[in-house]
Image (cartoon, rainbow, N blue to C red):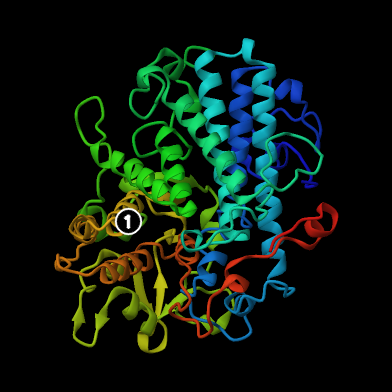
Amino acid sequence: MKTKLFIVLMILGLVFTSCEDWLKVNSETELSQDDMFSSDEGFHTALTGVYIGMTATDLYGMHLSWHMLDYLAHYYCLISGSNDTYLHSHQYKHTRVYPYIKGTWNGLYNLIANCNNILAKLEEHKSELNPINYQLVKGEALTLRAFFHFDLMRMFGFGNLRNRDVSSKKAIPYVTTFSKEVTPQLSYSETFELLKKDLLEAIDLLYGENGKNCYRITGDDDFFDNGPNGEDHAFFTYFDYQTSPRVDYYVAKAILARVYMWEGTDEGYAKAAEIAEEWFLTEDDSGQDCWDWVSRSRVTNSNVLYRDRTFSQEHIWHLSVTKLNDIIGNWLDASNPNATYERIFLTQEMAFSIFEVGEGNDVGVNDYRYSYLLQPQGSGLNNYATLKLDQCNGETNYGQKIPLISTPEMYYICAEVYAQQGNLKKAISYLNTVRRARGITADLDENLTYQEVREEILKEYRKEFVSLGQLFYFYKRWGVESVAGYADIMDDTKYVLPYPDEEVISGNRVQF
């Protein structure tokens, strides 16, 4: 990679005032790495910078969650003259689309560079660090490095790998060192091995000896409870069950399950299901299930400020975005979309189709995702605003969170794997569990065929991932050629985002 390398927190600390206490910047553009990495807390600061970097609009604060990827999945209605019409038609080289793609590529590789710098400095200062801190920071950095590379592969690489062999083709550059040297491309097969290597090492580090260091399970070590001056250790404040905005053992496992599913082999499918089922069997120290479904009362609260619209009880990992209300602005207001081009909403036809509502089909009328996460607006109430990430002008109690991985995805993985293995009843049972948790009263017929089960899985992905940027990846992984809301055939020209021009020219990259 020839992408510029920097400590992302240096820049972001000048923008996000909440980080001012973390930083002592030597100048407006330079922070001494000797100062940064002279203590455990310096590594915490550097990791915090990576998480803040993820919130950028080019990345998970917008384009890789509720905006660009969901346009590519054809959820949203088109507004004539909007920049997003070019996204919808996959005109990736258009001047109104190309900056999104370039910004995403550069942004993710810059975060990877920061992860690699943290990993290099960890080894340099290992003898000076608390051993538990060393393990956890290294586990987090490895997980994040794999996560960013995997999303680059999902965007800029091939999908539908279960049904075709691309193992010898060149994949995205997998960068493992903090260097200005160009990283050579490896094959898809080699790149998958690097992804799994990073995640498996991270899982081992984050779990620790007999689970001692798995802070979502225990978290009662003196290191977690006591900061440098004897106070609660601020860096681990959020490592409580279902509240963590940072990666841990379970997050690394969930990402690994995604990798196995994308790889598409029978062995990978089986391992993904094994990982996913770990969620349903996990208990905390008191014997209670660690993973629960959002309660009806939290979704249906009469006071909209207290509605848990992202179903936070189910988060395996979410991004904490302190400026999310400012980023979203008026994007979710569909009352008068022609007043500005910056609007996202579903047509009534699309909303009814996704949630199986109307024309005598009432499957979705009780579905929380339809009844409480969509709102008819505009003339004739035919524009369906998506409320999952609505911040209620910054006043909601459940705001500033973008789910990155949640419990339902683990159920969908199991359903897909068991259907593929011929155990249709078990697959259907997993789907029914999610449906019931979403308020749907009618179970699926236990005698569905294999193709019918796959159709139900597709329906669930469409319902669950509005505003979360995952449906495009699902379509691509399956190689779906005909998607709702788009008239043309979806193929590699639509599914594979192009490398930035300078990457191809200066890096001599091969994509197809």
Which residue is rendered at x = 43% and y = 39% of the image? Answer: 251
Residue 280 picture quarter: top left
Q: Quick check: 297 left or right of 489?
A: left
Where's residue 92, x and y in %? 68, 72
Residue under pointer 1: 412
Where does the image place residue 335, in percent across and percent down from the top left? Answer: 45, 79
Quarter of the image that includes the C terminus: bottom right
Residue at image position (79%, 63%) is 501
User: In the rendered view, would you say 80 is above or below 324?
Assistant: below
- Asked if residue 141 shows in the view, the reply is yes
Q: Position of residue 196 (x, y in %)?
A: 52, 39
Q: Which residue occupies the foreground of this view, 138 or 345? A: 138
Q: Nearer the viewer, residue 496 or 362?
A: 496
- Can see residue 301? no
Dot 1 falls on a residue whose secondary structure is helix
> Of the residues shown, which amino acid type is indicated by label 1?
Tyr
- Image mark count: 1
Q: Report whether 289 appears left or right of 416.
A: left
* Residue at 43% in and 21% down: 208
